[in-house]
Image (tube, helix red, strand yellow):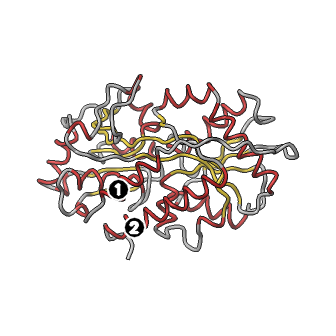
């Protein structure tokens, strides 16, 4: 299998930096702003809703508190179906999305649903993937973990917050291939409803490793519960994350950036769509959001409106090709 070209294409796309859209949205104001996080509390989608909602309110960009609703299930599919089938014309609603969303859409994992049924608003950064173990694990490096998988694949269970074949799973497969594991299908991956739940099972001893994103792993690192074996970034991050080694510097050239952003109901009015695109663009440009990005290891990804719609479409196509290569799609 040759994942390298597609992986590099995804990495380059995830690091694009484009100018924000200056949308005119003077004729709409939400009465009850709401953000759906399509997973349980503690994961990346939950982080996206809560951090963006708080910062929007702090900056006075929305008129009231953003209500955050956790609606887990189906790797985001329950929330997607809820929006498409029941809330398709609501103007006050935005929904957290990421590379995991694009992955599930690419693999037809939301039965009967496609990316064209919703409107894509904008991105708020890219979140690098991590592979971690419990703090008391004897495994100290990513090559050690991969060697154990090579020796006895069934002895290592790796958990993540996306479904089998989802983005968390794909990140591990990319790393496994780069580590020289010929049959990446032998890697034992267990799916959970969110990253927080996966870490809970790691700490309980049901898993030997965790795959997720830096934003969802940060709190568990700070509490001393887990240790990061590798960040899937091209080079070491700055600030508080500088201590975490990359997979690349350990001889495993695996890079995985998870974009984070929002979609909206497909029948949202143009005025409401322009409002939310403008608010996300303004948020992204603020010093406050730059601080949030720095504190949570987010890399630049500044896309709104039509540019973001095109970016998601390209991501879906690339992931479809990747999924066919590893046998997830026919």
Looking at the image, the residue that sits furthest to the right is 27
Q: Residue at x 19, y 41 (%)?
A: 251
Badges 1 and 2: C-beta atoms under 8 Å apart?
Answer: no
Q: Residue at x 39, y 43 (%)?
A: 129
Query: On the rendered structure, is 17 left or right of 24?
Result: left
Query: On the rendered structure, is 119 left or right of 12?
Result: right
Q: Is residue 106 above or below residue 30?
A: below
Query: To which quarter of the image does residue 234 belong?
Result: top left
Looking at the image, the residue that sits furthest to the top is 239
The quadrant of the image that shows the C terminus is bottom left
Mark with earlier residue (1, 2): 1
Q: Which mark is residue 303?
A: none
Q: Which mark is residue 321?
A: 2
Label 1 crowding class (10 Å Cα cut-off): few <14, some 14-19, many 20+? some
Query: On the rendered structure, is 186 left or right of 309?
Result: left
The quadrant of the image that shows the N terminus is bottom left
Q: Is residue 326 above or below residue 127?
A: below
Query: To which quarter of the image does residue 60 belong?
Result: top right
Q: Which mark is residue 190?
A: 1
Q: Residue at x 27, y 36 (%)?
A: 229
Q: Residue at x 11, y 53 (%)?
A: 151
């Amino acid at each position: 299998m040759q994942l390298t070209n597609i992986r590099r294409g995804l990495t380059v796309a995830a690091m694009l930096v484009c100018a924000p859209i200056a949308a005119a949205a003077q004729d709409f104001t939400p009465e009850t702003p709401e953000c759906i996080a399509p997973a349980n509390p503690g994961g990346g989608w939950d982080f996206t809703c809560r951090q963006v909602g708080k910062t929007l309110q702090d900056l006075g960009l929305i008129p009231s508190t953003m209500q955050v609703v956790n609606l887990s299930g189906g790797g985001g599919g329950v929330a997607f179906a809820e929006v498409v089938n029941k809330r398709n014309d609501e103007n006050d609603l935005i929904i957290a999305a990421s590379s995991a969303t694009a992955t599930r859409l690419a693999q037809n994992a939301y039965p009967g649903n496609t990316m064209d049924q919703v409107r894509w608003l904008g991105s708020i950064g890219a979140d690098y993937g991590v592979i971690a173990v419990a703090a008391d694990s004897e495994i100290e490096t990513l090559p050690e973990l991969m060697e154990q998988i090579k020796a006895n694949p069934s002895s290592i269970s790796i958990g993540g917050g996306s479904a089998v074949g989802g983005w968390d799973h794909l990140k591990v497969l990319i790393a496994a291939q780069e580590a020289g594991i010929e049959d990446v299908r032998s890697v034992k991956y267990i799916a959970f409803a969110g990253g927080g739940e996966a870490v809970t099972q790691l700490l309980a001893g049901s898993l030997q490793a965790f795959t997720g994103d830096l934003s969802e792993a940060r709190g568990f690192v700070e509490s001393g519960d887990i240790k990061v074996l590798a960040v899937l970034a091209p080079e070491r991050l700055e600030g508080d994350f500088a201590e975490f080694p990359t997979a690349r510097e350990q001889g495993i050239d695996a890079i995985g950036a998870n974009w984070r952003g929002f979609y909206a109901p497909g029948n949202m009015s143009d005025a409401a769509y322009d409002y939310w695109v403008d608010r996300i663009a303004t948020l992204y440009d603020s010093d406050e959001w730059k601080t949030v990005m720095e504190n949570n290891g987010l890399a630049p990804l500044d896309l709104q409106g039509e540019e973001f719609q095109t970016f998601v479409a390209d991501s879906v196509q690339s992931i479809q090709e990747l999924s066919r290569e590893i046998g997830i799609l026919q």
